Amino acid sequence: MARIDRIAEPWGTRTPYGPGEDWPVRVDTFLEEGITPRDVDRWVPTASILHSNGDGMDIAVKDGRMVGVRGAAGDRINRGRLDPKDLYAWQAGASPDRLTRPLVRRNGTLVETDWDTAMDAVVRRSRELLDEQGSGAFGFYTSGQLFLEEYYTLTTIARAGIGTSHLDGNTRLCTATAAAALKESFGCDGQPGTYADIDHADVIALFGHNVAATQTVLWMRMLDRLAGPDPPRVICVDPRSTPVARMAAVHLAPRPGTNVALMNGLLHEIISAGRIDRDYVDAHAVGYEELERRVREYPPGRVAEICDVPEELIRRAAGLLGGAERLVSTVLQGFYQSHQATAAAVQVNNLHLIRGMLGSPGCGVLQMNGQPTAQNTRECGADGDLPGFRNWANDDHVADLARIWNVEPERIPHHAPPTHAMQIFRFAEQGSVRLLWISGTNPAVSMPDLARIRSVLAQERLFLVVQDIFPTETTELADVVLPAAAWGEKTGTFTNTDRTVHLSEKAVEPPGEARPDLEIFLDYAGRMGFTGRDGTPLVGWTGPESAFRAWQECSRGRPCDYTGLSYERLRAAGGVQWPCDRDHPDGTERLYSGGRFWAAPEYCESFGRDLVTGAPVEEVEYRSLNPSGKAVIRSAGYLPPHEAPDELRPFHLITGRTVHHFHTRTKTARAPQLRDAAPEVWVEMSAADAEAHDMREGDLAEVSSPRGVVHATVRVTGIRSGVLFLPFHYGYWDLPEGAARTRAANELTITDWDPASKQPLFKTGVATLRLLERGGGPSSADRAGEAGPARSRTAMAHEEPR
Amino acid sequence: MNGIGLALRGLHHGERALAQDLLRVSERHTGDHEIHHVARDLSAWSQRHVRELAEIGGRYGARLGTAHPLETGLGAKLRGKGGELVGHRGPPGMPLLHDLRHVHVQAAGVSLDWEMIAQAARGNRDTALLRLVERCHPDTLRQMRWANAHLKQLSAQVLHG
């Protein structure tokens, strides 16, 4: 058994393998100092909740406490490996500053109270608002951190109990574009491919996806293929020189905001070279001719100019994509959080459609998720959709949902698409949303343009309920704070990017009076007395397992069919991919094999949206475009971004994730190894830009945009010149009181979103830079894959290849 | 100038007005960020139509100028009716509904003009003109649907809220 510092070496030791072989097992374990496997009372199965990879793992419990974690050797996702965040961040659960009692605001200050008082306050205000204004006064904004059962309960309460369309999840900031792109192309959300496609691929293309930082275990799988015989070739699209870029056969570093032009250029070359599967396209897709016409306008010369990428590299990348026999493409925030997000992500789907590369081993599109339980918010309708991938614009789907919920169809708002998060905040800003209930997320750090978000949340007239596990920048502004139980302290299921459902079992008791989110929602539903048509309770379930069964009924016959699953089955089998039903008792590894799509007008989840205007496509239009339910090839021209650098603000500003932190560091900064690996915000710039601005590694710089300022330590990296990068995890909760608010990247980001997916554009703003203070040379922290940080005794984990 | 020339002049006028309307909407609703950004993008479509119409107009005796730039900035904001600077009447969001309704009506008129030109081009077997219609008219329909979609999305909240 090897011991290894997994902060310094986030991807651990290689276990090489060849194409078509099984990925070897390597079990990663981290136990509290002084604890050996023999001391552990029991290992409780769960899956990772700090990224969307969905790695199966076990929590070590001793004397009622969590004392460590271990990867699940038999799990299809990770085969025993764990991400550094998973190895260390569980320690945060035992932090002394957990929220353990409800809080209510009295004379401007949050004070401790009991559950009855807190819930009564929420219920009283809810009743007042229902009487005064109606359901439009309510907004719900949830997480990518809760469990399926909790989202489904919240959806039922919001959509059928209150009857509001204002319910969304923070997956809006993260993977709304993945969902939108899948719906545009395939009429339905849900990943076509599977992680196992990595085992078969001969070309892997990563579009705006720094997998080395965001899904380290998936990167380990890629690295192991790269280290084995007959390795795949990698194409990387990213303005930063990431570890992925360094392993790539071709690295394209386009100017931020030009992804659509780049994709059109690549498709142009592939089509010109005749490297398309014409029979597949004719049999299984509509819209090809328009794509062909559109990409004709994007010869590599023009694209090279728009994107500022060498023409030769565009041709080489297109050559690799066009010559691939088993192509896996992945897409993440470099596309999703950038200008023309959905249009760009859809072009990746188009690449696979025109090459006929879907539904067979090694031929997959993975439109990634960022938050681990994002897929569940989407399935359960806790984001901008109805539960079970039902189409809000299809009256039969609404009627079916009304039957399941035992309510009149009119009770479920479907006069317009469900309201997206940015619009919910706008309604709150204008004063028509007067109760906002935020669960498991921290918009006061994670949303764009923070000065604005703070002013919205701080309004006197807004009744703000915040349900979370720690005090955050958002709970600070709440009227009522509800303490929640964390992962490992409650039971439920969740589903990762490639549709694998895991059961996560309660390992330890939550601290103090903290309660599972499910219990909180059930308590609210009970106190509000929501009923169905015949006066029986609307929410008829009482705990996780009965909630799961209710959800199974809701998913029956829909693409995300869970009816073949049960807690018992998941306990025995580990992760299973939906749909899992009578016809697919072992789950389904790949969707759309043989070109069979779920896009029929009667069945599809969405008729799509105009990629530029965002206007929903009407049913009649969709029926005439796609009467027989084929895949839809949607094309789009390039539009210049809405904010472009100028003399005053000469830099593009992009923001993003890092290997050691998650969301707003509420958990990861409470784990010493992760906190110390990257304690402070930094700004990355190219050597040329550093020289031009007389800056050196370690200097303190002020980055400013029209929205605000951030103070950050300079790092000189291989990022393209003219672009600055800020990690977006940093906020203020761990700073001394009264410290300046100059740390969160979102002080700077623009309020603008993709019209089709409504996902904010965190990577299309501008900024300028000045020196604040000379620094002390290079920083060692968080240079994973670059310099290698200082080794830490406390970060030693075990690795056991088998 | 023949009938087609006259119709082109009418359409040119309508497209220019639509381009201006969309810019005004963008500038008056900076707090409604999607409206603000997308209206600007959609105005660019009409501005392109205006240029393309000017190029083809001469063939039908219509001299269609592109010399007058569109108004932007505070002037346009103030001259617009019901703008946020003028103050609120009714619930917040009312001025936006009003403006979206106006854009929809304006775009509908432009769409009808394109229909007429298309019929004339077909009758006249003028393929260049027909191609122009085929290029531009879908944009107009998308502009209409954009306004319509936002009206649908906002009306319940604004009028009831």
Image (cartoon, rainbow, N blue to C red):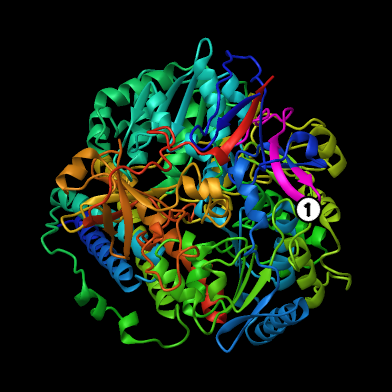
Residue that appears at 79% across and 31% down: A584
**Label 1 crowding class (10 Å Cα cut-off): few <14, some 14-19, many 20+?**
some
Q: Quadrant of the N terminus of chain B?
A: bottom left
Q: Is there any visible trace of residue A676 in the rendered image?
A: yes
Q: Quadrant of the C terminus of chain B?
A: bottom right
Instruction: Give the x, y percent position of residue A606.
Output: 60, 49
Residue in the foreground of this view, choosing between A147 and B142: A147
Measured along the vertical axis of the image, is residue A318 above or below residue A661? Answer: above
Total labels: the figure holds 1
Magenta region includes residue A76: yes
Residue placed under numbered mark 1 in the picture: A508
Residue in the foreground of this view, choosing between A152 and A14: A14
Residue that appears at 38% across and 67% down: A741
Quarter assignment of residue A710: bottom left
Instruction: Give the x, y percent position of residue A666.
Output: 56, 57
Q: Is there any visible trace of residue A194 in the rendered image?
A: no
Quarter assignment of residue A250: top left
Q: Farthest residue in the front direction?
A: A34
Chain of the residue under the numbered disc 1 shown in the image: A
Magenta segment boundaries in residue numbering: A60-82
Element type at marker 1?
loop
Instruction: Give the x, y percent position of residue A231.
Output: 50, 14
Residue that appears at 43% across and 64% down: B147
Measured along the vertical axis of the image, is residue A151 above or below residue B130? Answer: below
Instruction: Give the x, y percent position of residue A559.
Output: 71, 41
- Going by the image, does A731 lie left or right of A84? left
Magenta region includes residue A675: no
Quarter assignment of residue A41: top right
Measured along the vertical axis of the image, is residue A371 above or below residue A316? Answer: below
Measured along the vertical axis of the image, is residue A271 above or below residue A532? Answer: above
Which amino acid, by three-letter code, is at mark 1?
Answer: Val
